[in-house]
């Protein structure tokens, strides 16, 4: 956005969040988009949940799971209230209105870093699971190489 000063530009949060730069295709509906986003957000946590429960035990693991669910519900409630009161469409703009420009930029950067982290974790999961699965299927030895699987999945996806 152009600053009020004629000297240059001012860095601010994107008005609709950085995710608005990626427009869904004509065939993608809102319901499918929400499902895909939810799947991405919950995917890594669901995959790590059995290991966490095994390490903590049934009672402390369940207690922590219930506590985390309660905190998530409270966080969503606070975000909805803030979005309704500020009349903004994105988390970055809510932060921009409530806490200033730096907070809005910080939220946009945090979301971008989170998405990068999700990408890295899925690459690691592919590298850990697919070669073992191909070995189970008695695939040729070259297809069981982790590096080859990662390169091929990167090129094909």
Image: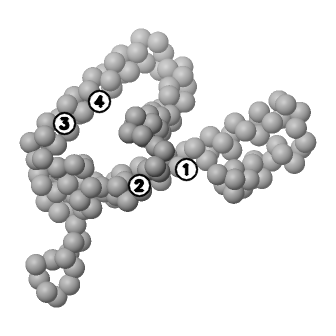
Q: In which quarter of the image is residue 137?
A: top right
Give the structural element (helix, strand or loop) at label 4.
helix
Q: How far apart are marks 1 and 2 (CA)?
A: 23 Å
Mark 1 or mark 3, which is nearer to you? 3
Q: Residues within 10 Å of mark 1 (few under 14, many from 20)?
A: few
Q: Would you call the spot at circle 4 few (<14 residues within 10 Å), some (14-19), or many (20 or more)?
A: few
Task: Between label 3 and label 4, give the one nearer the viewer.
Answer: 3
User: Where's residue 2, x and y in %?
Assistant: 19, 76
Q: In this view, does 144 lie above or below 31?
A: below
Mark 3 or mark 4, earlier in chain: 4
Dot 2 or dot 4: first in sequence order is 2
Q: Give 118 or 29, whichever is nearer the viewer.
A: 29
Residue under label 2: 23
Tell me, yes or no, whether the two marked residues, 1 and 3, touch with CB atoms within 8 Å. Answer: no
The residue that appears at 50% across and 28% down in the rendered structure is: 46
Give the side of residue 34 with respect to residue 55, left or right: left
Instruction: Label 3, secondary structure: give it.
Output: helix
| Structural distance between the alpha carbons of marks 1 and 4 | 24 Å
| Residue carrying label 1 | 120
Where is residue 78? Give x, y as percent: 17, 35
SS type, badge 2: loop
- Outermost residue on the bottom side: it is 7
Quarter of the image with the N terminus is bottom left
User: Mark 1 or mark 4, which has the lower sequence index?
Assistant: 4
Q: Say if 82 sits above or below 1 in the image.
A: above
The residue tagged 3 is: 80
């Amino acid at each position: 956005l152009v600053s009020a000063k004629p000297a240059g530009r001012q860095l601010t949060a994107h008005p609709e969040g950085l995710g608005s730069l990626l427009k869904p295709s004509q065939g993608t509906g809102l319901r499918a988009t929400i499902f895909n986003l939810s799947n991405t957000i919950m995917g890594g946590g669901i995959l790590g949940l059995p290991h966490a429960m095994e390490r903590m035990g049934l009672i402390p693991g369940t207690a922590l799971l219930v506590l985390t669910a309660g905190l998530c519900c409270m966080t969503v409630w606070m975000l909805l209230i803030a979005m309704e009161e500020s009349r903004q469409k994105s988390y970055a703009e809510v932060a921009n209105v409530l806490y200033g420009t730096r907070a809005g930029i910080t939220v946009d950067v945090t979301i971008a870093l989170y998405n990068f982290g999700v990408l890295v974790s899925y690459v690691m999961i592919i590298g850990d699971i697919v070669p073992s699965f191909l070995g189970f299927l008695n695939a040729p030895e070259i297809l069981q190489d982790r590096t080859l699987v990662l390169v091929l999945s990167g090129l094909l996806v």
